[in-house]
Amino acid sequence: MSSYDPIARLYDAWSTAVVEDIGFYVDEALASGGPVVELGVGTGRIAIPTAGAGVHVIGVDSSAGMLAVCAEEARRAGVAERLDLRQGDLRRPPVEERVPLVTCPFRAYLHLSSDAERLEALRAARDLLLPDGRLVFDVFAPSNEDIEETHGLWLEREPGIFERADWDRRQQTLTLSVRGERGESSMTLWWLEPQRWQALLAEAGFAVEACYGWFDRRPYDGGEDTVWIGRRT
């Protein structure tokens, strides 16, 4: 069972404030012409607006619960016919189609625990791309300030929804816990420095077209967040 299954009905309320990346990914999908494979589609926070913009999305997620919510929300939004949902792993997505764009939003690659898993996932994404196709994803590496301000504390992220971050600098892991009336769960994320992501992309067969520091496309010049665009070579 996925660690997201117990919070599938809590997830949208938990992440309701996360909107800064939606327009960015919708714009990338429109520029590609579609169709798009979205890895870690979740409840459709990005896929549903993308489908609403007229782009066909193949959405992959390991959580049956999250996919069920996504399907419901897609029907409610009137875009179900443009959203093809499939249960599967980031490293072995169940997709035979070849597309101009693969995305992996909201730090989903941080669920991979080793370079071997990261390379497997990046190479799998590359295999889904047409020649010159692009992979777009975002990740983060925490600042010392963020770790010190949040470590070991239960913080109310949204009304009635609490989140706890337990950081391990040596292992470069974040154990993230969430709880609310509609569910609770914990999951582990593994972060890397941007230089390591760049090296992994090259090893997996991508040329880095851009590395942004935020979704407004500002160039990366330090900070926690990186947004990567890799072109298949």
Image (cartoon, rainbow, N blue to C red):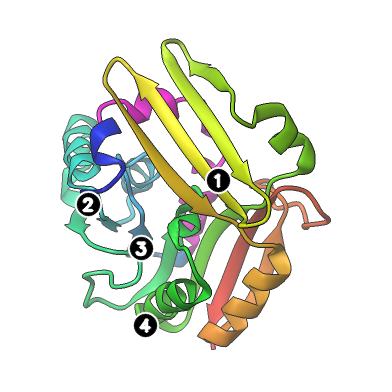
Residue at (47, 63) in percent of width and height: 113
Name the residue that disc number 3 marks: 36
Instruction: Assign the C terminus to one quadrant of the image.
Output: bottom right
Q: Earlier in the sequence, mark 1 or mark 3?
A: 3
**Callout 3: SS:** strand
Q: Earlier in the sequence, mark 2 or mark 1?
A: 2
**Callout 1: SS:** strand
The residue mark sitting in front, 2 or 1, is: 1
Residue at (32, 42) in percent of width and height: 44
Left or right of 3 in this view: 172:
right
Left or right of 213 in this view: 180:
left
**Callout 2: SS:** helix
Residue 92 % position (x, y) = 28, 73
Residue 59 is labelled as none
The residue mark sitting in front, 2 or 4, is: 4
Q: Quadrant of residue 170?
A: bottom right
Left or right of 90 in this view: 101:
right
Work out whether residue 207 can be spotted.
no
Residue 222 % position (x, y) = 81, 54
Q: Residues within 10 Å of mark 3 (few under 14, many from 20)?
A: many
Q: Relative to 188, does residue 128 appear above or below in the rendering?
A: below
Name the residue that disc number 1 marks: 174
Closer to the camera in the image, 48 or 16: 16
Name the residue that disc number 2 marks: 82
Q: CA distance from mark 1 to mark 3?
A: 29 Å
Q: In the rendered structure, which segment of residues is drawn in magenta?
A: 8-31
Q: Relative to 176, does residue 94 appear above or below in the rendering?
A: below
Q: CA distance from mark 2 to mark 1?
A: 35 Å
Q: CA distance from mark 3 to mark 2?
A: 11 Å
